[in-house]
Image: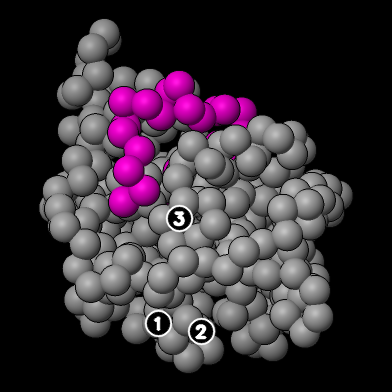
């Protein structure tokens, strides 16, 4: 078999931040300053076959072209893979839970109309220091309930372990997912979070229940953390293959573990955000495509 055909699925999905323009997590209202039609047409031109949407963009889309109009726009531009994010605080009580439930309804409604395969969700996050303690029983039960609700509208949820949240490593996240064991509840596995969490790529095949890996994302970073972990993850990520995380080896490890889905590309950096949209999308796409090719060259047949 020719090395170029080993990884047969080369479909790339621009995560919500990769094509958002000058917007970032927990900065302002998180909505993209660029209208959605311009963004979709630019993504298609750059070769993307998938895109992700942040929750904050949905009300504006609903008020302008509507979700059905968005679905048509995506179809017209050959965008076949769609993801949504981000739901936080789904296990809590009080005002935080009320706000989370408001977004849950918006996200699940959008997922059903748009035919979204996966919704990315978070855990207890700390921008500095250690994350607050969570009620473990509630965390398990509410994840199970949320996953079931997602399944009822034809989607599923992917929890993202991060070294800054209460699921600090891929190992901890995998254990949690397996304990809950809901068919509509799975994991997001990302190069940055895997590496910064201290998990060896060589261990991924052993650690991961591949039937519960729903999203795989690639990116890169400097060898050493710059600033806090939070600052590093939102401001210092690099394009695949341009840093020290050996993204091609990560891709190889995920492929050999059994991943056959599309590849998300999550670029979060100040320099990327400030590029013109077409340049940002082209560079993220082309470096990711080159990384998939480099990974294919590493796989022995």
Q: CA distance from mark 2 to mark 3?
A: 23 Å
Q: Is residue 126 magenta?
A: no
Residue at x 45%, y 21% (from the top left corner): 206
**Can you give x and y, in whole percent of width and height, for residue 75 in the image?**
58, 58
Contact (CB < 8 A) between labels 1 and 2?
A: yes
Assess disc 2: are there few (<14), some (14-19) or many (≥20) residues with their C-alpha within 10 Å of its C-alpha.
many
For residue 38, say whether it is visible.
no
Q: Which mark is residue 23?
A: 1
Q: CA distance from mark 3 to mark 1?
A: 21 Å
**Can you give x and y, in whole percent of width and height, for residue 272 in the image?**
24, 72
Give the SS element for disc 2.
loop
Q: Along the horizontal axis of the image, is 257 left or right of 195? A: right
Q: Earlier in the sequence, mark 3 or mark 1?
A: 1
Span shown in magenta: 196-218
Q: CA distance from mark 1 to mark 2?
A: 7 Å
Give the SS element for disc 3.
loop
For residue 204, say whether it is visible.
yes
Question: From the viewer's perspective, is the residue at label 3 or at label 1 nearer?
Answer: 3
Location of the C terminus by quadrant is top left
Question: From the viewer's perspective, is the residue at label 2 or at label 3 nearer?
Answer: 3
Q: Which mark is residue 88?
A: none
Query: Would you place residue 45 above or below residue 184 in this image?
Result: below
Q: Which mark is residue 162?
A: 3
Location of the N terminus by quadrant is top left
**Can you give x and y, in whole percent of width and height, for residue 274 in the image?**
24, 82
Q: Along the horizontal axis of the image, is 232 left or right of 146? A: left
Residue at x 40%, y 79% (from the top left corner): 24
Q: Which mark is residue 31?
A: 2
Assess disc 3: are there few (<14), some (14-19) or many (≥20) residues with their C-alpha within 10 Å of its C-alpha.
many
Residue at x 20%, y 76% (from the top left corner): 271
Assess disc 1: are there few (<14), some (14-19) or many (≥20) residues with their C-alpha within 10 Å of its C-alpha.
many
Q: Quadrant of residue 232?
A: bottom left
């Amino acid at each position: 078999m020719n090395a170029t055909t080993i990884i047969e699925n080369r479909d790339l999905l621009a995560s919500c931040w990769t094509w958002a323009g000058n917007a970032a997590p927990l900065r302002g209202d998180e909505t993209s300053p660029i209208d959605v039609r311009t963004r979709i047409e630019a993504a298609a031109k750059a070769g993307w076959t998938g895109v992700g949407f942040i929750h904050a963009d949905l009300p504006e889309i609903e008020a302008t072209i509507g979700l059905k109009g968005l679905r048509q726009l995506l179809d017209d531009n050959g965008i076949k893979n769609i993801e949504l994010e981000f739901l936080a605080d789904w296990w809590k009580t009080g005002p935080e839970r009320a706000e989370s439930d408001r977004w849950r309804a918006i996200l699940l409604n959008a997922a059903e109309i748009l035919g979204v395969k996966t919704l990315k969700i978070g855990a207890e996050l700390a921008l500095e220091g250690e994350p607050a303690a969570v009620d473990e029983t509630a965390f398990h039960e509410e994840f199970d309930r949320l996953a079931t609700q997602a399944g009822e509208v034809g989607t599923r949820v992917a929890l993202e372990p991060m070294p800054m949240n209460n699921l600090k490593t891929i190992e901890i996240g995998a254990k949690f997912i397996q304990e809950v064991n809901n068919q509509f509840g799975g994991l997001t596995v990302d190069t940055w979070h895997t590496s910064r969490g201290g998990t060896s790529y060589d261990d991924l095949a052993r650690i991961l229940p591949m039937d519960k890996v729903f999203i795989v994302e690639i990116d890169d970073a400097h060898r050493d953390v710059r600033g806090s972990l939070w600052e590093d993850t939102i401001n210092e990520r690099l394009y695949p293959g341009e840093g020290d995380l050996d993204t091609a080896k990560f891709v190889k490890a995920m492929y050999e573990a059994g991943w056959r889905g599309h590849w998300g590309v999550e670029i979060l950096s100040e320099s990327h955000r400030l590029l013109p949209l077409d340049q940002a999308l082209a560079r993220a796409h082309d470096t990711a495509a080159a990384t998939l090719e480099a990974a294919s060259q590493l796989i022995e047949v």
